């Protein structure tokens, strides 16, 4: 496939930032979710060291792509940020979660794509990491690539498997602290609550004594039944379904939720935060249907677990357990807002059977 001819680029940097600024997030419609204070960009990249990049494939046959999350500065394989994974509903094909569950660390960037491209994207992450390690003079014997997915079959001809190494490398090369949301990258072909889903993000500041930390979330939204959609407690889905004369809908998708922070946590604490992040998903109206894989991957670049040949201890700091409520609330609020942002930033898109998936922003009154 000729990428220059067939794939629309959606990377980070100035151009993506300008595109994103032309659109409005959920807050610009008068919906303020929770009481926490967002970071400067209200993006997962408010967490220091985190970058996000997209590559979108948009042709007559395919509307899909890949989104990558780089967790920290430097060589990820060597630094190994502390990580955790939690499957609220395991109807999914996420790769790499078993080793995260066992060892509690990341070795590669996290990549999101569609269901049938997981293997190709994982292969690309392995090649990328091998190259980075070779350049740094770091020996490689094994690599655990982390790839999440949702099924975009309603909009994308998924069996064409249009995402491979070239798209992954492009997304990695374009990764930055400013990135587009909506129907881009891994969210190009997703559907959420019967409307157009996509990539969404949000963040919250964490104050602890005299220190300030960040917690951010990125979602790939592809789940839910229209009538169940709730925005900041407002049952907008019922009004939309009535307006569109939708008699019934079915939850046929999934959601990937990536949580990042610089709060020093261990893997067990991070998993506790991921479990509470599910509260934000529930508040949007999710019932975690049979066919909805609801998978959470979290990491902190406030703690690392590098391999050591020497017999020496690795210093790890941990957040006090009795102060974790502030993190639980920040995670829930960020997830709820990120899901809403994924939908209001997404543009109307036609499915492969001719159906039209509208944008949430079309139905929201500007309450500002």
Image: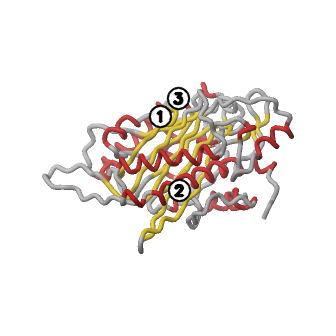
Mark nearest the camera among 3 and 2 is 2
Residue 40 in percent (x, y) is at 57, 67
The mark nearer the N terminus, 1 or 2, is 1
What residue is shown with label 1?
A: 94
N-term-proximal mark, 3 vs 2: 3
Q: Quadrant of the N terminus?
A: top right
C-alpha gap between disc 1 and disc 2: 26 Å
Q: Which colour scheme is used?
A: secondary structure
Mark 2 neighbour class, 10 Å CA radius: few under 14, some 14 to 19, many 20 or more? some
- The residues tagged by marks 3 and 2 sit, at their Cα atoms, a distance apart of 26 Å
Q: How far apart are labels 3 and 1 at the CA level?
A: 9 Å
Foreground pick, 352 / 139: 352
Residue 168 in the image: x percent, y percent? Answer: 50, 42
Residue underneath mark 2: 329
Please identify the residue farthest to the front as the structure is shown. 322
Crowd class of label 1 (few under 14; some 14 to 19; many from 20; radius 10 Å):
many
Residue 331 position in % (x across, y down): 52, 53
Q: What element carries label 3?
A: loop
Along the line of sight, which residue is nearer the eye, 309 or 292? 292
User: Is 101 on the left or on the right of 32, as rendered?
Assistant: left
Q: Pointer 3: what residue? A: 91
Helix, strand or loop at disc 2? helix
Choose mark 1 or mark 2, whichever is in front: 2
Q: Quadrant of the C terminus?
A: bottom right
Circles 1, 2 touching at the beta carbon (< 8 Å): no
């Amino acid at each position: 496939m000729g990428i220059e001819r067939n794939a629309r680029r959606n990377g980070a940097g100035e151009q993506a930032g300008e595109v994103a600024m032309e659109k409005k997030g959920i807050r610009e419609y008068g919906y303020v979710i929770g009481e926490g204070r967002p970071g400067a960009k209200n993006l997962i990249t408010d967490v220091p060291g985190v970058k996000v990049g997209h590559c979108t494939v948009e042709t007559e046959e395919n509307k899909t792509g890949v989104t990558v999350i780089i967790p920290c500065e430097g060589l990820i394989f060597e630094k190994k940020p502390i990580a955790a994974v939690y499957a609220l509903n395991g109807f999914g094909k996420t790769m790499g979660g078993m080793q995260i569950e066992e060892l509690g660390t990341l070795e590669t960037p996290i990549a999101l794509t569609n269901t049938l491209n997981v293997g190709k994207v994982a292969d690309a992450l392995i090649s990328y990491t091998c190259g980075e390690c070779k350049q740094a003079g770091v020996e490689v014997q094994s690599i655990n690539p982390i790839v999440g997915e949702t099924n975009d079959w309603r909009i994308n001809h998924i069996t064409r498997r249009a995402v491979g190494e070239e798209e992954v490398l492009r997304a990695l090369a374009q990764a930055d602290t400013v990135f587009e949301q909506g129907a881009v990258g891994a969210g190009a072909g997703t559907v959420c609550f019967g409307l157009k889903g996509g990539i969404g993000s949000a963040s919250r500041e964490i104050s602890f004594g005299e220190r300030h930390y960040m917690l951010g979330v990125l979602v790939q939204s592809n789940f839910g039944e229209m009538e169940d959609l709730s925005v900041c407690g407002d049952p907008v889905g019922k009004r939309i379904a009535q307006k569109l004369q939708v008699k019934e809908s079915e939850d046929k998708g999934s959601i990937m939720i990536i949580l990042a922070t610089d709060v020093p946590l261990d893997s067990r604490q991070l998993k506790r935060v991921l479990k509470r992040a599910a509260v934000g998903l529930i508040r949007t109206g999710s019932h975690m249907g049979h066919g909805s894989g609801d998978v959470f991957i979290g990491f902190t670049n406030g703690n690392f677990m590098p391999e050591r040949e020497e017999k020496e201890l690795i210093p790890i700091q941990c957040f006090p357990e009795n102060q974790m409520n502030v993190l639980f609330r920040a995670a829930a609020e960020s997830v709820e807002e990120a899901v809403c942002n994924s939908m209001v930033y997404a543009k109307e898109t036609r499915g492969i059977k001719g159906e039209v998936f509208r944008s949430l922003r079309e139905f929201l009154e500007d309450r500002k």
